[in-house]
Amino acid sequence: MSNPLHRKMPKRLAIAAIALLPFSTSALAAEKTLTVYTYESFISEWGPGAKVAEAFEQTCECKVDYVGVADGVELLTRLKLEGENSKADIVLGLDTNLVAEAKATGYFAPHGLDTATLKVPGGFSDDSFVPYDYGHFAVVYDTEALKDPPESLEELVEGDPNQKIVIEDPRTSTPGLGLLLWVKSVYGDRAGEAWAKLKDRVLTVTPGWSEAYGLFTKGEAPMVFSYTTSPAYHMVAENTDRYQAAAFAEGHYIQIEVAGVTKNTKEPELARQFLAFMTGPEFQSIIPTTNWMMPVGETKEPLPAAFDKLVKPEKTFLMSPQEVAANRKAWIDEWLAAMSTN
């Protein structure tokens, strides 16, 4: 509502009044902006993005600006397309399966941080990329729709084709790539045969995780490819045990998510400040109950009790970044050929 006094004030007096208002030169200075490229679920309404931005902005006198794409693989694709014209200061959401390929672009700078205190299964250290969370991939199922879930990757491949699963595309999605590498880790040269059998159980292949999980929770399929940590969301946020992860006898493939500073960032100090913040307790405390992954650093409080009920894989699969970079295209071609056969 406008103030009627404003209409009665002579213009020259109004200008004088404005001139007398107290002001701060720092407030008028251009605010620094940190542009973070990430995946859509990170900046979704329920994701960690908003809380992370709010917490970091309180320490940096800056503004965090997110740019979202469907999933992690698309982050690398977009960066390759934009090249030196990219506006990204930080790329957050690649994983170790993409590290070698990402470094080969020459777009990332050394982070200069001491990451020795960060803990991930099997360990991870890199001069350009800093881990911020991890999780084991898993088939998550609806206990009300599926009474006998698969207990191994073999059972998933060989199981009833009427019991469908939603999976993600390995060309655009880090979970999709994770499933591809999990199948390759277990089946080796027979991976193509495994995919040819599994495709009969696949309801659809989505570009990213968000679309796949959304179809699953809407009841479109009794299974979805996700994470062992996904049931924690339902237990904590929805107070239900309905959705559970299946423990696979062969073991589970792990995803370690990382972030890096781009070489062409206009705010290198601010970008490295963000990476340091990312490894600290403020950021790490946000991750478990928003990104629903495991923290790599200390949190301010213990994790919710639901995390103690999650599947804890006895064996972890993880290929080296170099092996993935050398074979990703060939393995995706193998997947495409198998999935397109009648």
Image (cartoon, rainbow, N blue to C red):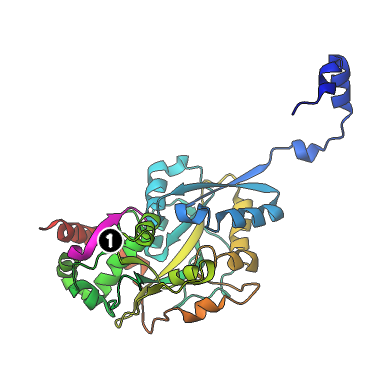
Which of the 4 image quadrants contains residue 52? bottom right
Report the side of 12 relative to 170 (left or right).
right
Residue drawn at point x = 88 percent, y = 21 percent:
16
Q: Position of residue 280 (x, y in %)?
A: 63, 67
Q: Position of residue 330 (x, y in %)?
A: 22, 60
Q: Residue furthest front?
A: 144
- Between 18 and 105, the residue placed more toward the observer is 18
Q: Position of residue 158 (x, y in %)?
A: 18, 74
Report the side of 64 relative to 327 (left or right).
right
Report the side of 34 relative to 260 (left or right).
right
Residue drawn at point x = 70 percent, y = 54 percent:
58
Q: Residues within 10 Å of mark 1 (few under 14, many from 20)?
A: many
Give the residues in magenta. 199-208
**Is disc 1 placed on a helix, strand or loop?**
helix
- Between 94 and 183, the residue placed more toward the observer is 183
**Position above or below: 262 against 123:** above
Please indicate, yes or no, whether residue 279 appears anywhere in the rendered image.
no
- Between 51 and 276, the residue placed more toward the observer is 51
Image quadrant where one finds the N terminus? top right
Image quadrant where one finds the C terminus? bottom left
**Position above or below: 288 against 259:** below
Which of the 4 image quadrants contains residue 22? top right
Residue drawn at point x = 44 percent, y = 74 percent:
241
- Give the residue pinned by disc 1: 328
